[in-house]
Image: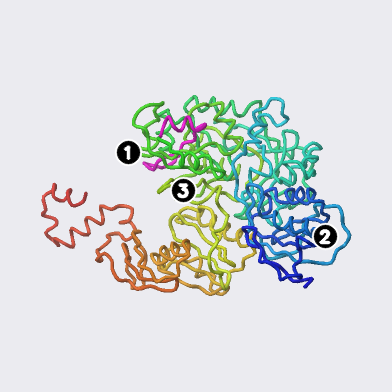
């Protein structure tokens, strides 16, 4: 029974071994050695130092290391202590760690009495999960605001419990060499923290300080669009690969550069106070920021961005400021303050507080508010002390800008200034949007702070799958084992820039999660760019089309673990049907494999095709034509307006 594995449920409960044969019996005081394979979100979240502390507390020897498929641990010592280690391992996890699968196998003892953290394995292995980017933790915020701390006011403070993860990682295992931080050699002080298992920054891969890490610069209107020219801040990067890191879209970025300036945050505050628009480089891309109380600045942003009425997100300094603008329940406050820090839709106050410019959310009863989620945002809001519009740094319908040179080129006609830094973003990731409904948080856009954390399903995928998503508000999904790995928000695939972002993200996810799709699933609509992309892969994988509304219902079934059959109602606008018509408003009797359409709206004309979806008056005109025929031209104008409205 020496090499018999014992599977451990993520709750920490293990199937009881047969009497006398278990690998880590609590009453066995003879020396035992156990190998534990752990999969889940266990890299970049302080898991290895946690393992080290637990083993040291129990007086066990052995080691822990990162591999491409998770974390491997070997512990050795008295059987009761080894048993306690296995039991406690999943019960006392660090805040950001999640165990999806764990198996313990007894092996031969080696006589080790000291526990160590071993170098990461570099061999190609199955896969592991990657943690999302997490808002600044309370410990780092305290250091940020402590004048006696060496990281006081440093815009890139982080530790194993917070900071960038997904947006800076290029590959696994999650080590500094596989992130965009590899061009910043650690100074002696940071290196000492990084190498000390008891330190909060032990193997926190993005860790840095003002002496050795990224820096800010502000470029005003007169300099906007100029290329950054100076070389690396300290030593040269170790190799051509790190000297020219590539973004997920395949483009080459410039190496780390000594961006500086006397006080870039003060320059931003001055620009905002003058009614200007500033492009701010954040965690997963650029925001376009302006004073949310300045009607002229907000109107100018709408004009330059090409965004007529869609509401802007607003960043506020804290809950007190949020409550000046909106009613905030306890559940909504918890969602605003959650580690993911999404934009939260909240009901506006009818009176009280400093009013926002009407153009922030014209005609809306709700506002989308978020709290600062990086130290850079915290420093900016502490100086500004008022609400700021923080909308995605793009022209309407384009993907968010995420690289310095790209942002200056694409946003130069919108922004009056740029707050830049030289920590490269490898994968752009826009803000998430959520609301509280029925006492629970409901995600409307699942992106920063949530992606790429998987959705765990009741069933296992027989083959690795790529589902490419629809045309608008695109999100794609990888399926492997029992995980649905949803991408961040990509956007509308109606232009080449968005399509390049989609293709680059698919390539990055497949590489990161070790997925070579054998099945590619697409929407039935033949003109969707995502559909055409899937069909172009016909020689590489089996291609499967799925009706749009059946996909919506099946997704809800999978989320709730239902196999069906169910009666599904999809009130989701248009979706291409197998009969070649656009469907909308469906009643389907279906399971996860197929469906029967048992009820729907009658078909009616859509003059202009897809244009009618964006201009509903065309639908009214088509219905009038269908109802009145040629007589429609002789209808009184008020009647026509009545029907069209």
Mark positioned earlier in the residue sequence (3 or 1): 1
Mark positioned earlier in the residue sequence (1 or 2): 2
Residue wearing tag 1: 363
How packed is label 2: few (under 14 Cα within 10 Å), some, or many (20 or more)? some
How packed is label 3: few (under 14 Cα within 10 Å), some, or many (20 or more)? some
User: Residue at image x 80%, y 62%?
Assistant: 28
Along the line of sight, the residue nearer the viewer: 112 or 350: 112
Residue 306 location, quadrant: top left
- The quadrant of the rendering that contains the N terminus is bottom right
Q: Say the numbered circle drawn on residue 29.
A: 2
Residue wearing tag 3: 441
Residue 284 location, quadrant: top right
Residue 310: x and y in percent read 39, 43
Q: Is residue 625 left or right of residue 430?
A: left
Identify the secondary structure beneath mark 1. loop
Does 544 sit above or below residue 498?
below
User: Residue at image x 50%, y 28%?
Assistant: 272
Mark positioned earlier in the residue sequence (2 or 3): 2
């Amino acid at each position: 029974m020496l090499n018999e594995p014992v599977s451990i449920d993520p709750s920490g409960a293990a199937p009881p071994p047969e009497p006398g044969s278990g690998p880590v019996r609590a009453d066995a005081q003879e020396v035992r050695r156990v190998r534990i394979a752990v999969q889940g979100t266990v890299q970049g979240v302080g898991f290895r130092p946690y393992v080290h502390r637990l083993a040291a507390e129990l007086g066990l020897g052995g080691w822990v290391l990162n591999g491409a498929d998770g974390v491997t641990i070997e512990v050795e010592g008295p059987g009761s202590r080894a048993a306690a280690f296995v039991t406690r391992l999943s019960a006392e996890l660090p805040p950001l760690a999640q165990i999806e699968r764990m198996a313990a196998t007894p092996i031969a003892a080696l006589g080790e009495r000291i526990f160590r953290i071993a170098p990461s394995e570099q061999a190609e292995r199955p896969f592991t999960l990657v943690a999302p980017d997490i808002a600044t933790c309370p410990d780092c915020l305290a250091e940020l605001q402590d004048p006696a701390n060496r990281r006081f006011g440093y815009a890139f403070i982080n530790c194993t419990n917070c900071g960038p993860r997904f947006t800076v990682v290029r590959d696994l295992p999650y080590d500094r060499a596989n992130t965009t931080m590899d061009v910043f050699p650690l100074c002696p002080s940071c290196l000492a923290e990084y190498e000390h298992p008891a330190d909060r920054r032990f193997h926190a891969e993005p860790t840095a300080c003002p002496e050795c890490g990224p820096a800010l610069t502000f470029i005003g209107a007169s300099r906007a669009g100029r290329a950054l020219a100076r070389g690396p801040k300290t030593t040269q990067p170790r190799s051509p690969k790190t000297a020219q890191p590539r973004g997920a879209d395949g483009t080459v970025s410039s190496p780390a550069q000594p961006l500086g300036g006397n006080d870039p945050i003060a320059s931003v505050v001055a620009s905002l106070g003058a009614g200007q628009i500033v492009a701010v480089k954040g965690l997963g891309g650029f925001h376009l920021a302006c004073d949310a109380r300045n009607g002229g600045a907000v109107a100018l942003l709408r004009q330059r961005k090409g965004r007529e009425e869609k509401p802007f997100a607003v960043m506020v300094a804290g809950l007190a400021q949020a409550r000046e603008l909106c009613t905030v329940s306890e559940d909504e406050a918890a969602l605003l303050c959650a580690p993911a820090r999404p934009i939260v839709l909240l009901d506006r106050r009818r009176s009280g507080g400093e009013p926002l410019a009407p153009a922030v959310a014209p005609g809306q009863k709700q506002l989308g508010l978020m709290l600062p989620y990086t130290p850079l945002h915290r420093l900016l809001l502490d100086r500004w002390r008022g609400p700021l519009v923080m909308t995605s740094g793009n022209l309407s319908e384009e993907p968010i800008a995420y690289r310095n040179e790209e942002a200056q080129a694409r946003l130069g006609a919108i922004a009056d200034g740029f707050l830049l830094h030289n920590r490269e973003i490898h994968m752009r990731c826009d803000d998430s949007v959520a609301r509280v409904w029925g006492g629970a948080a409901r995600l409307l856009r699942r992106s920063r702070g949530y992606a790429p954390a998987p959705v765990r399903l009741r069933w296992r995928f027989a083959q690795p799958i790529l589902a490419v998503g629809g045309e608008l508000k695109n999100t794609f999904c990888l399926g492997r084992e029992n995980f649905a790995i949803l991408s961040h928000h990509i956007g509308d695939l109606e232009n080449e820039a968005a399509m390049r972002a989609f293709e680059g993200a698919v390539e990055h996810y497949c590489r990161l999660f070790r997925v070579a799709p054998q099945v590619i699933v697409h929407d039935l609509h033949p003109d969707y760019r995502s559909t055409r992309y899937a069909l172009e892969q016909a020689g590489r994988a089996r291609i499967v089309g799925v009706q749009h509304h059946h996909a919506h219902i099946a997704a809800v079934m999978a989320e709730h673990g239902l196999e069906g059959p169910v009666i599904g109602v999809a009130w989701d606008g248009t979706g291409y049907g197998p009969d070649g018509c656009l469907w909308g408003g469906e009643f389907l009797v279906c399971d996860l494999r197929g469906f029967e359409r048992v009820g729907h709206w009658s078909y009616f004309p859509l003059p202009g095709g897809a244009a009618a979806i964006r201009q509903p008056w065309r639908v009214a005109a088509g219905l009038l034509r269908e109802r009145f025929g040629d007589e429609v031209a002789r209808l009184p104008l008020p009647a026509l307006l009545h029907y069209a409205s």
